[in-house]
Image (tube, rainbow, N blue to C red):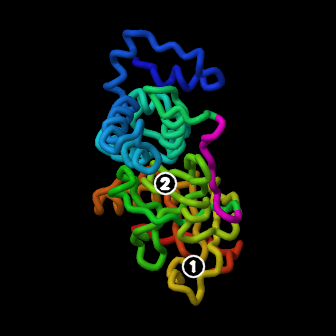
Amino acid sequence: MVDIYRTIQLNRADLDAVNIGNNRRALWPYTLGGTIMQRSHGQAIVHGADYVYDTQVVGYLHSFLAASGWEWIPLNDGDDGGEVLDFERNFGECRYVSAALELLFYAPAPYGFEIPEDEVETVQYAGAHGAGFLAAHDPATAFGLGYNIIRPDTGRLQEHCFLWPNHWVTEWDGDFYDANYNRRYGTLPEMALVQMAAKTERNLEDRGYQEIVTTVDLRGTNRAALDGVYVRTSGNDYGNALVQRAVQLNEALGFEARSRPFVGPFPRPYDLELPYTIELD
């Protein structure tokens, strides 16, 4: 184990105390962080500067992770960015990648860009109403993470978007950097294609559990096809069968289903008496 970036991460409160021994220094160029910093420094020389960072570094992190086979798995919680940059982890939720970018920004030279550590942080966004949001999504540029919505009217995947209960990004200097999607936002709401207006949950008689979210009113807009109620079911046979259906549908497109799917949109408003299920042959 190299443990260069994890050492820096553990000493965030006192970066002057960081001591990377010679043996580990020799391995630094072969870490993910070392690869990115060398690339950044090389590009900076071309432009007559010390370092290239900001959106270019977001792109470097995203592309090198993709090339090394990073798997975006929303159900695998964690925020050990050092583990990612030391090439000791190749899967996890969005916060891992956001924390890796945060660490690159504040790590001391030559390991990072030496931005004051109190000026950079990871930030969670759960939508304008705390109920989640739909984001523009392309599995081909999102580490193979497949779609997570099955439409009740067609039984097929809702392509081009992903329903997030929340999402992590990296904030610095008033901007929000998303190394998972390789994007930059001026404000957090910019990451939402559609906002969810409300959420609720309920326990089912067969020990199942449903999470229910409803979009803001999209009727009469160019996104009316996404308007309505979305339901995620777990804890019962139907919920497990939905997972398998999502796996099959995503595999047919060349992607992987790595989270429990939602089914939607159903017509609004939410009705407690309705089952919100679809036929699964």
For image coordinates 44% across by 51% down, the residue present is 55
Rendered location of residue 193, percent (x, y)? 53, 69
Residue 31 in the image: above or below residue 19: below
Rendered location of residue 278, percent (x, y)? 50, 71
Mark on residue 164? none
For image coordinates 36% across by 41% down, the residue present is 48
SS state under label 1: loop
Rendered location of residue 98, percent (x, y)? 52, 43
The answer to whether residue 254 is left or right of residue 155 is: left
The residue most toward the front is 48
Residue 82 visible, this orientation: yes
User: Which amino acid type is marked by label 2?
Assistant: Asn
The residue most toward the top is 22
| Residue named by callout 2 | 240
Front position among marks 2 and 1: 1
Q: CA distance from mark 2 to mark 1?
A: 26 Å
For image coordinates 46% across by 56% down, the residue present is 183
Residue 181 in the image: above or below residue 4: below
| Residue named by callout 1 | 227
Label 1: few (<14), some (14–19) or many (≥20) C-alpha neighbours in 10 Å:
many
Residue 122, magenta (yes or no): yes
Which callout, 2 or 1, points at the residue further toward the start of the chain? 1
Quadrant of the drawing holding the C terminus? bottom left
Label 2: few (<14), some (14–19) or many (≥20) C-alpha neighbours in 10 Å:
few
Quadrant of the rendered structure where residue 117 is? top right
SS state under label 2: helix
Range of residues picked out in magenta: 118-129
